[in-house]
Image (cartoon, grey):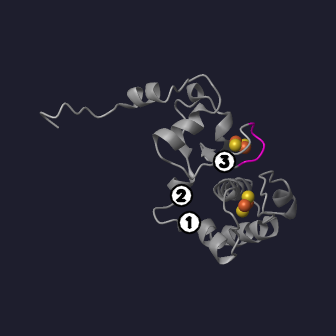
Amino acid sequence: MRGTGYRPATARDLMRLLRIDRGRRHEFKRVLRDLLNLTGTKFGCGVGECGACTIHENGAAVRACQIPLSQTAGKRYTTIEGLSAKGDHPCQRAWIEEDVVQCGYCQPGQIMEAIALVHRVRAEGREITEADLDGIRNICRCGTYPRIREAIVAGAARM
Ligand code: FES
Ligand code: FES
């Protein structure tokens, strides 16, 4: 914008402004939420336990709060926003139809975990089992677990 003195902030400027340290855990999550405005990735425990910050790294579910920015180079990341343009990924539709959500805070992470699980078991040439569902460790303080299980099975049938 000539003449106004306005200069768009670069990513480097913004990182400096936000005091983002590439080597610290939590900073990748901050880049996603505070710099890129991808706020579907939630921040809960901050210690890799709750799963609210689950995203995909090269297609596998990972806890964003545990990834230092310095370890992200060359990897492909997807957040809940990247699943579909209109929020209509088969798993998201199943979540709506099964009326899973209560407060909603944990649900983006739950969906990302679920989709990675479906892809993983398909790659192994099988379908999801009860044991696979039991293995999900994402926490829901509203106790929506039974509906999450139903939605994963319903969503997987359409993927
Ligand atoms: S905020 Fe990352 S696992 Fe809880
Ligand atoms: S829906 Fe409230 S924490 Fe899961």
* Residue lying at 72% horizontally and 66% vertically, measured from the top left: 152
Mark 3 highlights which residue? 54
Of the two numbered discs 2 and 3 in the rendering, the one whose residue sits closer to the viewer: 3
Spatial CA span between label 1 and label 3: 17 Å
Q: Could you tell me the amino acid type at mark 2?
A: Leu
Q: Position of residue 30 (x, y in %)?
A: 56, 37
Mark 2 highlights which residue? 83
Give left or right: position of 59 versus 51. left
Q: Nearer the viewer, residue 40 or 74?
A: 40
Whether 96 is drawn above or below 29: the answer is: below
Where disc 2 sits, the SS reads loop
* Residue lying at 65% horizontally and 29% vertically, measured from the top left: 25
Q: Position of residue 94 (x, y in %)?
A: 65, 72
Spatial CA span between label 2 and label 3: 13 Å
Whether 49 is drawn above or below 140: the answer is: above
**Is the CB of mark 3 within 8 Å of ligand 1?**
yes
First in residue order: circle 1 vs circle 3: 3
